[in-house]
Image: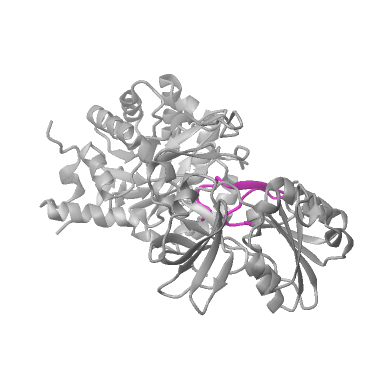
């Protein structure tokens, strides 16, 4: 499956909460096959402060419209500039990059666990998991109720459980405190979010011997396995997050 | 008609554009984007005799118009290179050059001997300038005595084209170019990365696990250009210019400063097709200005 450099066209840019926005970008030559968990390397404007590309995971794919959606949190100068994109603007990307989540089998019970903006790669995964005939549930964790991101699309693929650290909505605490997360016997848990959150979910899954994959977001330069900057320590030594990941089975990580 | 071919030692390059070691993997990472064989040469990832895990993460920090890296020569060693990588890169119809590293002179020599036996590797780039390893690397390339020793030892056991990659972290880089020439090197390439540092002020912590790392990208270009100019004036062997080349105009600047060929490095991370675009752009520049070959403009500036 070929990677390519392409100018996508912005179809929509919607702010979904303070500091979070959802971009939809269209391919004029037709989308390549994109697997759940893959990402794009997005060029900002190559100005001094935004010299490198920004890796952004694919939030959703719409083959009828040849568009990809990207859920982005404004964290620095690069994402701040991207937040100002308008319909019709171009977005230069390298894609599709990275490996993908391992899809579940028919009838399997899967849990998608997303922390904040970490829910980004889980929507497209959830849709694919449903197509595979899996039963999908979603657990999303946020700092407080005002930080909750629009999860209406997740509702269409399964039951959604919310946890907030201050208890202003849903379960007080973390995803690992949600009763459904703790009590059910999941066949698979897929996870993306801040590293401490992923580690605690990986620990919970490991203790119960549940298949668990996490999507990492290490700092990257190239995104195609050339620079060896984004490495993670695994049972096989240092491997590139951009090519061997971003999705890793927790058994291979030295957490 | 423009003839882009250039000669570096015994090597004939179809054009003066190579890829800088550590920025182009083993070539295959770029196969999806362009025909890698269209380049003058590809210099593959720095190789050591024994496998190296490299430095801990984080090993990269973005800086204004550039980046710092502290990868630390992560590679799987010469045994793996011979059995797994060499058969694959041998298919490229261009010069594949190995960047050779070591912790001591014997390392360099043993590795060089192994590589000389590989028929499809017509040259090595002797790296005495990596700033990211505790032993060897830059320690050799910033001291005139040890630089001479390691170049001499490698030259003694290697009969093909020997390129020596110089460190910019010295007071007078031309002096090292002269030493390389005196010890029989066929060419020098410069510059390797400049030693730099970045701090996360929120965490009050260095951004790199190793504290310091190598700066590359357009931020270093004026320094690199100056060093190429100084070295080219001091030596008669070919100089290969490296440092922040983002496009053909940058490459032409290096050639005008005295470089016989250039290497594209960090730019490949941002636009993987850069090296191929630089080849085209150099040809266009020569054509437009009535020159027939890159050699016509090497060091050809009015001062």
Q: Is residue B195 visible?
A: yes
Image colouring? one colour
Using the rendered view, name the quadrant where residue B144 is placed: top left
Residue A209 versus residue A50: which sits nearer the camera? A50
Q: What's drawn in magenta, residue-wise?
A: A224-246
Q: Is residue B107 magenta?
A: no
Q: Relative to A113, is B291 above or below? A: above
Is B5 displayed left or right of B24 in the figure? left
Q: Residue at x 53, y 34 (%)?
A: B102
Q: Main secondary structure of the magenta part?
A: loop
Q: Is residue B89 visible?
A: no
Residue B175 versus residue A150: which sits nearer the camera? A150
Residue B53 versus residue A13: which sits nearer the camera? A13
Residue A90 versus residue B180: which sits nearer the camera? A90
How many discs mark residues in the rendered view? Answer: 0
Provide residue A67's location: percent of width, then percent of height.
49, 71
Is B55 displayed left or right of B96 in the figure? right
Q: Residue at x 83, y 66 (%)?
A: A186
Provide residue A1's location: percent of width, then percent of height.
52, 70
Q: Residue at x 23, y 37 (%)?
A: B258
Using the rendered view, name the quadrant where residue A102 is placed: bottom right
Q: Relative to B88, is B50 above or below? A: above
Provide residue B118's location: percent of width, then percent of height.
48, 51
Q: Residue at x 46, y 22 (%)?
A: B146
Q: Is residue A241 magenta?
A: yes
Provide residue A134's location: percent of width, then percent of height.
76, 75
Q: Residue furthest left?
A: B290
Is A102 displayed left or right of B178 in the figure? right
Using the rendered view, name the quadrant where residue B222 is placed: top left
């Amino acid at each position: 499956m070929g990677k390519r450099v392409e100018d996508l066209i912005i179809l929509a840019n919607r702010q979904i909460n303070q500091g979070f926005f959802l971009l939809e970008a269209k391919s004029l030559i037709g989308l390549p096959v994109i697997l759940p968990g893959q990402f794009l390397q997005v060029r900002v404007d190559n100005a001094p402060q935004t010299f490198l590309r920004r890796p952004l995971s694919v939030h959703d794919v719409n083959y009828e419209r040849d568009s990809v959606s990207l859920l982005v949190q404004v964290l620095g100068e690069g994402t701040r500039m991207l937040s100002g994109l308008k319909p019709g603007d171009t977005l230069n990307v390298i894609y599709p990059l990275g490996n993908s989540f391992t899809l579940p089998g028919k009838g399997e019970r899967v849990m998608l666990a997303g922390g904040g903006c970490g829910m980004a790669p889980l929507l497209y995964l959830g849709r694919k998991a449903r197509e595979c005939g899996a039963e999908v549930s979603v657990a999303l964790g946020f700092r407080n109720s005002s930080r909750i991101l629009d999860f209406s699309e997740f509702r269409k693929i399964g039951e959604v459980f919310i946890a907030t650290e201050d208890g202003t909505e849903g379960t007080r605490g973390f995803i690992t405190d949600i009763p459904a997360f703790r009590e059910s016997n999941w066949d698979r848990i897929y996870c993306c979010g801040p590293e401490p959150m992923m580690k605690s979910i990986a620990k919970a899954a490991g203790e119960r011997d549940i298949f668990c994959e996490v999507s990492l977001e290490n700092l990257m330069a190239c995104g195609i396995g050339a620079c060896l900057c984004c490495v993670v320590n695994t049972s096989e030594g240092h491997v590139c997050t951009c090519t061997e990941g971003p999705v890793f089975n927790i058994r291979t990580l030295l957490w | 008609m423009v003839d882009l071919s250039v000669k570096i030692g015994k090597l004939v390059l179809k054009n003066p554009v190579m890829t800088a070691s550590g920025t182009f993997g083993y070539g295959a990472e770029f196969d999806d984007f362009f025909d890698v064989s269209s380049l003058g040469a590809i210099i593959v990832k720095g190789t050591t005799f024994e496998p190296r895990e490299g430095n801990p993460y984080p090993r990269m920090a973005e800086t204004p118009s550039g980046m710092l890296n502290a990868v630390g020569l992560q590679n799987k060693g010469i045994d793996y290179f011979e059995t797994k990588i060499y058969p694959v890169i041998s298919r490229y119809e261009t010069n594949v050059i190995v960047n050779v590293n070591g912790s001591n002179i014997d390392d360099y020599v043993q590795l060089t001997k192994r590589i000389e036996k590989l028929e499809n590797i017509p040259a090595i780039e002797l790296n005495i300038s990596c700033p990211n390893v505790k032993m060897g690397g830059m320690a050799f390339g910033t001291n005139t005595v040890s630089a001479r020793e390691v170049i001499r030892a490698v030259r003694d056991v290697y009969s093909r084209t020997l390129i020596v990659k110089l460190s910019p972290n010295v007071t007078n880089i031309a002096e090292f170019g002269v030493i390389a020439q005196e010890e029989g090197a066929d060419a020098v390439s410069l510059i390797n990365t400049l030693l730099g540092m970045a701090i996360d002020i929120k965490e009050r912590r260095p951004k790199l696990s190793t504290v310091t790392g190598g700066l590359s990208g357009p931020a270093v270009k004026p320094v690199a250009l100056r060093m190429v100019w100084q070295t080219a004036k001091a030596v008669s062997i070919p100089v290969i210019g490296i440092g922040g080349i983002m496009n053909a105009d940058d490459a032409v600047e290096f050639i005008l400063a005295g470089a016989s060929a250039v290497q594209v490095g960090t730019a490949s991370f941002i636009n993987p097709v850069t090296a191929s675009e630089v080849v085209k752009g150099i040809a266009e520049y020569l054509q437009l200005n009535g020159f027939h070959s890159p050699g016509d403009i090497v060091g050809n500036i009015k001062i």
